[in-house]
């Protein structure tokens, strides 16, 4: 399988999410208003979902296509379904 394309962009997004989570930790330590903390949690979750979506898109467009050359289509479909179910939990 090929490495993820645009790794730099994804890593930049993940570092930004890491900063958001550290900010949320500080907010909790400083006993900030719960509503503000929840808004920051929602923003971090949305950012993480975006990164996951980008990697899932890559997986479906590139990884699965390459994998199909070596495996039966039913096996590839089952693996894709398994990944999707685990991703959406």
Image: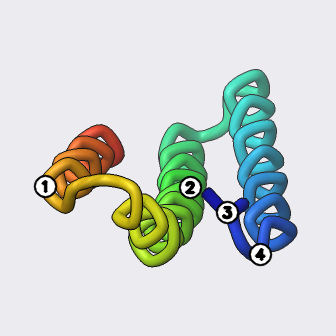
Label 3 sits on residue: 2
Crowd rating for badge 2 (residues with CA inside 10 Å; few <14, some 14–19, many 20+): some
* Distance between the alpha carbons at the discs numbered 4 and 2: 16 Å
**Earlier along the polypeptide chain: callout 2 or callout 3?**
3
Label 1 sits on residue: 74
Q: Mark 2 against mark 1, which lies toward the viewer?
A: 1
* Distance between the alpha carbons at the discs numbered 1 and 3: 22 Å
Q: Mark 4 against mark 2, which lies toward the viewer?
A: 4
How has the structure been colored for display?
rainbow
Q: Residue at x 51, y 73 (%)?
A: 62
User: How many badges with numbers are in the image?
Assistant: 4
Label 4 sits on residue: 6
* Distance between the alpha carbons at the discs numbered 2 and 1: 30 Å
In this view, the residue farthest toward the top is: 29
Q: Residue at x 72, y 60 (%)?
A: 3
Q: Is residue 86 left or right of residue 28?
A: left
Residue 9 lies in quadrant: bottom right
**Earlier along the polypeptide chain: callout 2 or callout 1?**
2
**Residue 76, percent from left and from top:** 26, 54
* Distance between the alpha carbons at the discs numbered 4 and 3: 12 Å
């Amino acid at each position: 399988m090929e490495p993820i394309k645009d790794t730099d962009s994804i890593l930049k997004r993940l570092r930004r999410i890491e900063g958001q989570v550290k900010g949320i930790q500080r907010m909790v330590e400083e006993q900030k208003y719960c509503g503000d903390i929840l808004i920051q949690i929602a923003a971090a979750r949305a950012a993480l979902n975006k990164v996951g979506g980008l990697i899932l898109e890559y997986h479906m467009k590139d990884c699965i296509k390459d994998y199909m050359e070596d495996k039966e289509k039913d096996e590839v479909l089952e693996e894709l379904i398994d990944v999707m179910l685990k991703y959406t939990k």
